[in-house]
Amino acid sequence: MPTVNDILDSMDYGPAPEAAGEVTAWLTARAPFGHFIDGSFTAPADTFATDNPATGEALAQVSQGSAQDVALAVKAARKAAPKWAGLAGHERAKYLYAIARHLQKRARFLAVLEVLDNGKPIRETRDIDVPLAIRHFYHHAGWAELLTDEFPDHTPHGVCGQIIPWNFPLLMLAWKIAPALAAGNTMVLKPAEYTPLTALAFAEICAEVGLPKGVVNIVTGDGATGAALVASDVDKIAFTGSTDVGRTIRRATAGTPKALTLELGGKSPFIVFPDADLDAAVEGVVDAIWFNQGEVCCAGSRILVSEAIARDFTDRLRARLGKLRVGDPLDKCTDLGAIVHPTQLTRIRDLVSAGEAAGATLIQPEMQLPAKGCYFAPGLLVGAEPANPASAEEIFGPVATVTTFRTPAEAVQLANNTRYGLSASIWSENITLALDIAAQVKAGVVWVNCTNQFDAAAGFGGMRESGFGREGGREGMAAYLRAPEVKSKPEASAPDFKAMPSPATLASSGIDRTPKLYIGGKQVRPDSGHSYTITAKGRELGLAPLGSRKDIRNAVEAAHKAGAWGKQTGHNRAQVLYYIAENLAARQGEFEARLKEAGHDASEVAATVARAFYYAAWADKFDGAVKSTQSAKITLAMHEPWGVMGVACPDASPLLGFASLVLPAIAMGNRVVAVPAQSMPLLATDLYQVFDTSDLPGGVVNIVTGPRDDLAKTLAQHDDVAAMWYCGDAQGREMVKGESAGNLKAIWAFENRDWRDAQGRELLNRATQIKTIWVPYGE
Ligand code: NDP
């Protein structure tokens, strides 16, 4: 026992362990665990151990879910679905509220259980994981209450399959289950193999509050159980985890009508400018990369620091590193606990070694790690070049790379030099600079002078290979609801392209016009040098250029160059859209004649003029929001354009179908590469002059005519196309989803509809993604 003098000499913290007796008694009484299906636990079968990573000791046996277990759970959820969805929102709200209350009553128990199963420190489970999980249920009790007011005519998806990772087991469960319940879905959730225990404790709470049987089902197991859930008869998959598994799921669901949201990995920048409050930024780094052992998808794992202060900042970080306490996660003085599993520890060690081998220097404090358990000392990899594997790969451990920059432009370039786009943290006392950078970083969440802020009212989710869809807030609710059904109107199958007459047969047909492609505001010949014949009612109407992969690539490049369009004001974009309407109206007769000639409804022209007016009206009115999160922060939800979008247009309604998709996309600031109606692209090619005379900057709309599905495939595969809309049959829809699995772009694939009614917020929502920006406000 140290004397008071000893303590005053060292100023060490004494041990302050949280008692685990209640939890171990619960485990002894309950384990081995079966699955929670249809309101009760099944008999345990085919069990495996879940261990305490801080000690290596087994905590409990849990069951490995088979495809049959998953099927049983989905069947129970399916049976429970109509009644649950049919309850008044107020009735569902009462259940969510009861769950929140019960979580609150068991807060300490859950905090300890999470520590034992995951290895994270009790201070974090007690102060962050559990309170945020509770907040999520309260917040969503509110959404259940307000559902009919705020989401009129929306319906739940039905049965949701939910797969969560091991880094925030209870919190991720809450992020998945609370909105799903509020929206009226039933669900089957699979927790991670390493950390199933809080989900099983949650199952008991569901039973305690009398949640109707089958509404929430929990099936434990490994990746095979997750894959079985993806393959099962569910209506939606919500997944959080690694980008690789996200890709697999995208491929597996491509040919199905299952809705999908993916919250994947990240390699988020933490940018420190010379005028930052450096002490605050140091504490920011603690919260960014050493919080939760760095096992955080949005961890600030790439520190980008201005060269001017790099030495000073690194010295401060080194000093701070030396003060972090690593050890028993149940001890309230512990900053970093255990890594979740030996496999993850090996992965961290390997990546850090690879980072050193590639030229970075590892700074780690001298510290005695516990003899038993999975521990890794926190550190920094200084001087990591962008190509260093430690800069590119998600380490998912307590080590950040440190890289310097000279100018704000270089900081942005380094920040965006990643395939991910989950979050970013920006440190500067100059709010103008910080918000300028916030606008430029490719990230779904941006924290200014703060980091790792979460709240149930704020959307969270990524761009690029960090996935799509948002969790939290209104946008998170929308992801668990189906918008009112738009009646589809299947188009007559697109013409068999290969069966068309070859250009050679046309020379005698007396056709005098050979339109070109429209790329970068110029009319250009197709790379193939070929055209194809357009026929209607057995007559040849003209030629259209035969676009190919090369043309699509050129068009994407041109669209990228037109980035200034996204920075224009909504007002300016509206003016261009009005101008397009005006110029089209001036040539109404000509377009009507063209449509009639092709056997289409001439009223499409007037409807297209009206559509241009409609989206011009929206261009400066599709407002974002300020979210009610924390009193000392403003949390903005900004609608950002995707950037470059691919749009494969319907074959039916060759003018109105094209305009109904392209106009909302550009009204929101996107640049578009459009493939117009394959069998009648001449209405789109006739629009070139309209665009040219309407002040539409070159490259904002690019048009490549030709075989829709071949061209759409190239767009889907293209890494620099951020989002894609595809209108077509089931085969084509599956194709674009599958072809884009590698780059994980957001896809909206749908069947043809009656374009006379097809306008509204749905398209604007789909033409934008939400960037959540947290800015200090007040104290
Ligand atoms: P995974 O993506 O493998 O796991 C996430 C969840 O998906 C788990 O429940 C997992 O089950 C399940 N799963 C695994 N394979 C499949 C499949 N084919 N179909 C459906 N579900 C599946 O992440 P890991 O836990 O293996 O971690 C690997 C790496 O991923 C980490 O080192 C880290 O870099 C990253 N990661 C990123 C996270 C994020 O939030 N961005 C979260 C967790 C990890 P099981 O637990 O049995 O594997």
Image: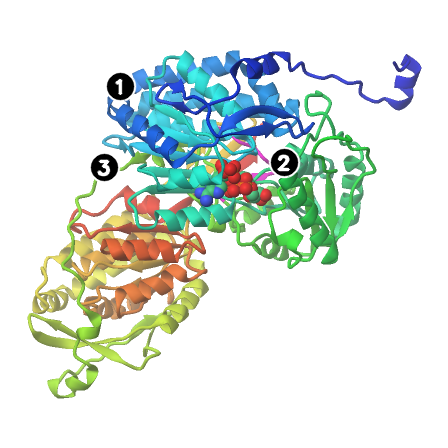
Q: Quadrant of the C terminus?
A: top right
Q: Nearer the viewer, mark 1 or mark 2?
A: 2
The spot of residue 353 in percent (x, y) is: 72, 51
Q: Which residue is mark 1?
A: 88
The residue carrying pointer 1 sits among few (fewer than 14), some (14 to 19) or many (20 or more) residues within 10 Å by Cα, namely: some
Amino acid on which the number 2 mark rests in the picture: His
| Mark 3 to mark 2 CA distance (whole Å) | 45 Å
Mark 3 secondary-structure assignment: loop
Residue 318 left/right relative to 79: right
Q: Which residue is mark 3?
A: 484
Please state which of residues 107 and 401 is positioned toward the viewer in this rendering: 107
Residue 1 left/right relative to 600: right
| Mark 1 to mark 3 CA distance (whole Å) | 18 Å
Is the magenta region chiefly helix, strand or loop?
loop
User: Does any portion of residue 77 appear in the rendered image?
Assistant: yes
Q: Earlier in the sequence, mark 1 or mark 2?
A: 1
Residue 552 lies in the magenta-colored region: no
Callout 1–callout 2 Cβ contact below 8 Å: no
The spot of residue 138 in percent (x, y) is: 44, 19
* The CB of the residue at mark 2 lies under 8 Å from ligand 1: no
Question: Residue at the spot x=43%, y=25% of the render?
Answer: 35
Question: Residue at the spot x=35%, y=18% of the render?
Answer: 93
Callout 3–callout 2 Cβ contact below 8 Å: no
Residue 577 left/right relative to 645: left
Q: Earlier in the sequence, mark 1 or mark 3?
A: 1
- Quadrant of residue 534 within the rendered picture: bottom left
Identify the mark at residue 341; answer none if there is no mark.
2
